[in-house]
Amino acid sequence: MRLLHIMLRVKNLDESIEFYTKHLGMKLLRKNDYPEGKFTLAFLGYKSEGEETVLELTYNWDVHQYNLGSAYGHIAIGVNNIYSTCEQMKRDGVNVIRAPGPMKHGRTVLAFIEDPNGYKIELLERT
């Protein structure tokens, strides 16, 4: 078995694709419209779907807002030089909701950002 993808529902597909490609370095792997179902699926990742887990963004054409609920936690992404990464993201207008630094009660250096839909993304310093 293998984890294939993680799906997030988004309110604006183009804005979300730009966020994940520009700020997090993902590539748009494929995008398909389903007119009969009135939705579009976009798959993004760092490598091909055959090589690693990817992110599926689902855009329902008639829905423009979602309640994220209290069960969602975050997506975690490893980055090099978390401090300069977060500074660049701030300059680019990304909402850095927790500045980089050591986690409480631990040594892991992390930060949190928020995507255009309000989803939390944890950035972890890769050593």
Image (tube, rainbow, N blue to C red):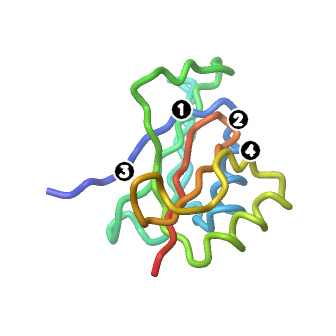
Locate residue 47, reporting x and y percent. Answer: 45, 72
Inter-mark Cα distance, 2 to 4:
6 Å
Q: Tell me the amino acid under the disc marked 3.
A: His
Residue position for label 2: 12
Inter-mark Cα distance, 1 to 3:
13 Å
- Residues at marks 1 and 2 touching, judged by CB atoms closer than 8 Å: no
Judge from the rendering whether residue 2 lies leftward or rightward of residue 110; answer left or right: left
The numbered mark, 3 or 2, whose residue comes first in the sequence reads 3
Q: Tell me the amino acid under the disc marked 1.
A: Arg
Which residue is the extreme one toward the left?
1
Q: Which residue is drawn at 50% across and 53% down?
A: 43
Residue position for label 3: 5
Q: Check disc 3: other Cα within 10 Å, few if <14, some if 14-19, many if 20+.
A: some
Residue position for label 4: 15
Residue 9's disc number? 1
Residue 54's disc number? none
Inter-mark Cα distance, 4 to 1:
13 Å
